[in-house]
Amino acid sequence: MEKFEVLRSAAVPLAIENIDTDQIIPARFLKATSREGFGKNLFRDWRYDSEGNPIEGFPLNDSRYSGQILVAGKNFGCGSSREHAAWAIYDAGFRVVISSYFADIFRGNALNNGLLPLQVSDEVLQRIFQQIEADPTTEFVVDLPKQELYIPAWEERISFDIDAYKKECLINGYDDIDFLVNQKEAIEAYEKNRIWAY
Amino acid sequence: MAKSLFDKIWDAHVVRSIPGGLDVFYIDKHLIHEVTSPQAFAELEERHLPLYRKNQIVATADHNVPTKNQHLPIQDPLSRTQVDQLTANCERFDIELFGLGHQNQGIVHVMGPELGITQPGMTLVCGDSHTSTHGAFGAIAFGIGTSQVTQVMASQCLLLSRPKRMRITVDGELKPGVTAKDVILYIIAQLGTGGATGYFVEYAGSAIRSLSMEGRMTVCNMSIEMGARGGMIAPDETTFEYLKGRPYAPKGEKWEQAVAYWKTLHSDEGATFEKEYTYKAEDIAPMITYGTNPGMGIAITDAIPSEVPAGETVSFEKSLKYMGFKPGESLLGKEISHVFIGSCTNSRIEDLRTVANYVKGKHKADNVEAIIVPGSKQVEKQAKEEGLDKILAEAGFELREPGCSACLAMNDDKIPAGAYCVSTSNRNFEGRQGPGSRTLLASPLVAAITAVEGKIVDVNRYLN
């Protein structure tokens, strides 16, 4: 997993609530057996028509918008548990998704892949959308060690929450597997003493 | 101290807690399928990690499989590769596999319970969000991503923070024609598509208790559709009765011991929940969805809301535009071209019986294509033993072979662009049943009536 510390970037706005993982990556693209290459089908059916032509007006096709931050409406990533959704967003070049809340499974999947789900209040989210609309080049600075979203245009620093362990993982590029495999002794002891063995 | 059902099971599975609030959480059973496991196997190998507890994993092929001619090789090369890869991985790691053609093959959430693999008090995961289904047995069951599939393969554990608790109580008696599917569509419509995010739900109350195990599975199955991490129902005599004698259920003395333990698994009087909701069974009517998330549901005779719900401005309008509906209009009389009966929500024997019972002696409307896909080889076999296949064929319904089918358009079964499909599945997301497809979620009974009438009707008038 790639390390994440501080990111300075413009952002791409997707002001739609309840974006489900079927929109992020439709099921027909889940047939790969590797983790690579999902980015080209990110938001496939919102981004391209049935002939594969870019749909005008969709923010990812709009040359005004760029950057490694995706800003989306509340309840982002609901529905299917497909980790391919996090892979597709990452593969398309994004490192941060900002929303007012995330579906639980998506949040976990993102964190396991070095993609930061950054939660802000509804009010801040709406201000961010307005800001990007007014000036698509607006820069955002995501400072993970400080747990701070800095918006130079507002001269404002907004703090965000993240689990302390997950924060360390992202900063150091670790994932849960190394940690869990190192718990073998405790796990074996648990297996010998549990209430009911299935 | 009074404990909730959820906490009793959670606490029994904490290997250790680490500073910062995370638990090393033990998983009893891991179900895998072809779509979300290949990258996990690859990662194990890349990291040179052994598979830790192969006997706690069971595999099946469901998402990609065709529902016609399953005895022939899968035509789609990508689907075939994925299914073949699952077979190869299971052989290599010596994992029990119910592959295509096996008598136990089926949708993972139909297969596990019917074989008695799912049991009360257990923790169970699968790389599929509808793993919440298994909570119907009083288990902690939830969907995970592929990285977590690897973690469970390597350690039989996950690193988790404890979700908050929610209890949803439905008391009273359900009206005629109101099924488990209507109960859960009603609850999701009340809470909204994100209303239970961060929570684990326990369903309680006399209306829930009165449901069969299959009905309980339908309810728990859709917990994820309101954002819940999972849903569960305390085990009782209905649960024990269902499990007894199933191939993987404990036998003899072990069975007695198991039941004695399972009887302790209920929320104690005074257990606390961060959120509680109570509904009256009498208020629930046959339901249908009109939009593109499962929270957008109404009683079938109600009109689509005329006002935009707060905080949903963009998605509400986008949704109705996609569906071709207007705010405030009724769905009654809308023509439907497709009916799909199947999926991990509603493809069990009782669902097939409900449909067969209604369509017996009737015929589907000419404008409707109706397919019915059993959840497993076992369900298919039983349906044939009961003669349901003949009733369905005479009514013009096409009975297919088991698989996820048109629930997610990953296989050959797709709904055409623009077409309306009344579906017993769990998601009405844009394009879920095929690019441009328009899904209306409903119960098997509503789906059967719709297929016969060819349009959305007030189903209350069609019940005897």
Image: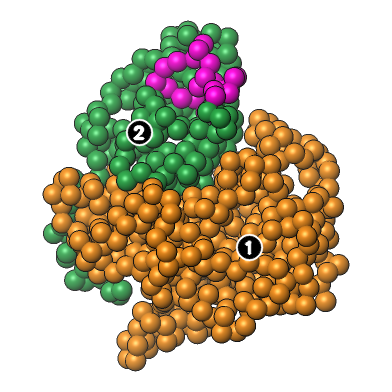
Judge whether residue A64 is colored magenta.
yes
Q: Is residue A46 above or below residue B54?
A: above
For the colour orange, the matching chain is B
Q: Residue B445: which quarter of the image?
A: bottom right
Residue B234 placement (x, y as % from top left): 50, 71
Three-letter amino acid code at disc 2?
Gly
> Horizontally, is B456 left or right of B440 in the view?
right
Front in this rendered view, residue B357 or B122: B357
Instruction: Locate the N terminus of chain B and report the quarter of the image it occupies.
Output: bottom left
Q: Is residue B26 above or below residue B114?
A: above
Residues drawn in magenta: A53-77
Looking at the image, how many numbered discs can be counted on the residues? 2
Q: Residue A116: which quarter of the image?
A: top left
Residue A168 placement (x, y as % from top left): 25, 34
On the same chain, marks 1 and 2? The answer is no
Instruction: Locate the C terminus of chain B and report the quarter of the image it occupies.
Output: bottom right
Label 1 sits on a secondary structure element that is: strand
Residue A141 visible in the current orientation: yes
**Mark 1 or mark 2, whichever is nearer to me:** 1
Judging by the rendered image, the residue that carries numbered circle 1 is B371
Three-letter amino acid code at disc 1?
Ile
Q: Is residue B443 above or below residue B275?
A: below
Judging by the rendered image, the residue that carries numbered circle 2 is A37
Residue A180 visible in the current orientation: no
Chain letter of mark 1 equals B
Chain letter of mark 2 equals A
Residue B244 placement (x, y as % from top left): 44, 85
Label 2 sits on a secondary structure element that is: loop
- For the point 64% across and 59% down, the residue is B340
Chain A visual colour? green
Q: Mark 1 near mark 2, Cβ–Cβ under 8 Å?
A: no
Q: Residue B50: which quarter of the image?
A: bottom left
